[in-house]
């Protein structure tokens, strides 16, 4: 049974609406003013809210604005029930996130049709979300076994060779040992990314945890980015292909992201750039740091991405995987995107298919000096969220 919260200060209208909805099979919760309505919304988490605009103490706009600030209530369909039907009033309500307006006085069919439309629309949105979630599950089911088995098979295969160590010379034993180590590192990296992605999804559903990603804030972003990019380039054997470009105004301060998470972004984006570009082609890491913005761009030549692929980028997705077989679950880019957005930045991909692709991470100037709440106290709690 669906629950509808009716917030209306006129007792006759409130009771009349409640009676009609109960006859239609809805469970009805009523509130005589906005403040009570907000409290009942958190208590009952209704499927829909009908709310008057003109009420004393806390009007309908303030009710909606209050509910929009909390993830538990900001997706509940919200319909204004009001005699104020000017375009200015409707625009204000819609800007705050209202789903519909119902003019008073209204007929019973108008009331029921409005409610029915809201529920139908929400059902469509939920179905779309469930389909997207199912796609993620399918990608996990298809990709995870392959990605785990590839390095694991390497470990098993080369360790099997070591069982016949009597037939191997010292150089061959060393070569097998290095191959096992490489496969183990690949498996370790994959599992760390999987765990980190899960943590980021938890943080996304608990926004108050996002500040843990910003502790301690980076004081020297350019130096960290350069050192991390050079390390990745050396590991992939492409140090000569790396081009570092820095544009920084003197005296620029901290960036609103924790050092291990900035390193993670750089590691994944630079590694991805090398992975999807040919040897002896440049990978450009560009850093622009000014008083009003911080921008990181990583550019490589290669197959790039189409606008559709960029729009649909998600976890566990590697486009054209059958044609372009690569290691990794496609998690690197989505992890970088998640971290950036949870720290208040923007993440964009610009690409010319079959030519170049640029990934940009940007923080606006108003975030560069944004203080944390008691950062030293929070630092003691951040360890659970660090990249291991």
Image (spheres, grey):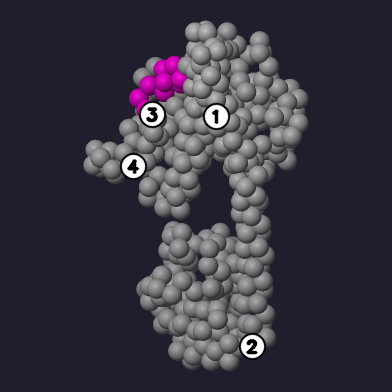
The residue closer to the viewer here, 326 or 387, is 326
> Element under label 1?
helix
**Which secondary structure type mostly characterizes the magenta part of the structure?**
helix
Give the x, y percent position of residue 226: 46, 17
What whole-number distance in Å separates the C-alpha atoms at marks 3 and 4?
15 Å
Give the x, y percent position of residue 381: 28, 43
Q: Please tell me whether residue 122 is drawn above or below residue 252 in the rendered image.
A: below
1 vs 4, front mark: 1
Give the x, y percent position of residue 30: 45, 83
Of the image marks 2 and 3, the number of the one nearer the N terminus = 2
Q: Which residues are magenta?
A: 218-229
Please give the label number shown on residue 156.
1
State the residue position of label 4: 384
> Element under label 3?
helix
The residue closer to the viewer here, 281 or 146, is 146
> Element under label 4?
helix
In the displayed structure, does residue 369 sit left or right of residue 226?
A: left
Any magenta on residue 160? no
Q: Residues within 10 Å of mark 4 (few under 14, many from 20)?
A: few
Any magenta on residue 219? yes
State the residue position of label 2: 108
Of the image marks 4 and 2, the number of the one nearer the N terminus = 2
Please indicate, yes or no, whether residue 266 appears anywhere in the rendered image: no
How many numbered markers are drawn? 4
């Amino acid at each position: 049974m669906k629950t509808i919260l009716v917030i209306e200060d006129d007792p006759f209208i409130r009771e009349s609406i409640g009676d009609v909805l109960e006859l239609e099979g809805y469970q009805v919760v009523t509130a005589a003013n906005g403040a009570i309505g907000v409290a009942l919304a958190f208590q009952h988490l209704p499927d829909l809210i009908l709310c008057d605009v003109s009420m004393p103490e806390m009007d309908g706009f303030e009710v909606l604005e209050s509910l929009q600030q909390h993830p538990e209530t900001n997706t509940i369909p919200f319909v204004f029930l009001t005699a104020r039907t000017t375009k200015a009033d409707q625009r204000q309500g819609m800007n705050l996130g209202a789903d519909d307006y119902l003019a008073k006085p209204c007929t019973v069919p108008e009331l029921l049709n409005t409610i029915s439309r809201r529920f139908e629309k929400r059902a469509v949105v939920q179905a779309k979300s469930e389909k997207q979630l199912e796609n993620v599950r399918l990608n996990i089911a298809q990709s995870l076994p392959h990605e785990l088995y590839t390095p694991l098979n390497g470990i098993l295969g080369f360790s099997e060779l070591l069982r016949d160590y009597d037939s191997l010379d010292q150089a061959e034993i060393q070569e097998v040992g290095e191959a096992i180590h490489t496969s183990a590192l690949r498996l370790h990296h994959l599992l760390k990314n999987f765990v980190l992605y899960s943590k980021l999804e938890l943080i996304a559903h608990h926004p108050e945890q996002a500040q843990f990603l910003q502790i301690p804030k980076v004081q020297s972003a350019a130096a960290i980015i350069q050192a991390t990019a050079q390390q990745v380039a050396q590991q992939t054997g492409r140090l000569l292909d790396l081009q570092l470009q820095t544009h920084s105004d003197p005296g620029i301060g901290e960036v609103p992201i924790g050092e291990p998470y900035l390193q993670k972004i750089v590691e994944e984006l630079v590694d991805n750039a090398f992975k999807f570009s040919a040897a002896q082609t440049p990978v450009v890491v560009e850093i622009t740091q000014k008083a009003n913005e911080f921008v990181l761009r990583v550019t490589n030549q290669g197959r790039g991405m189409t606008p559709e692929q960029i729009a649909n980028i998600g976890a566990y997705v590697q486009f054209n995987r059958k044609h372009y077989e690569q290691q990794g679950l496609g998690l690197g880019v989505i992890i970088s995107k998640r971290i950036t957005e949870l720290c208040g930045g923007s993440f964009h991909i610009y690409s010319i298919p079959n030519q170049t692709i640029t990934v940009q991470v940007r923080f606006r100037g108003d975030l560069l000096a944004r203080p944390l709440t008691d950062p030293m106290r929070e630092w003691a709690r951040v360890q659970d969220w660090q990249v291991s």
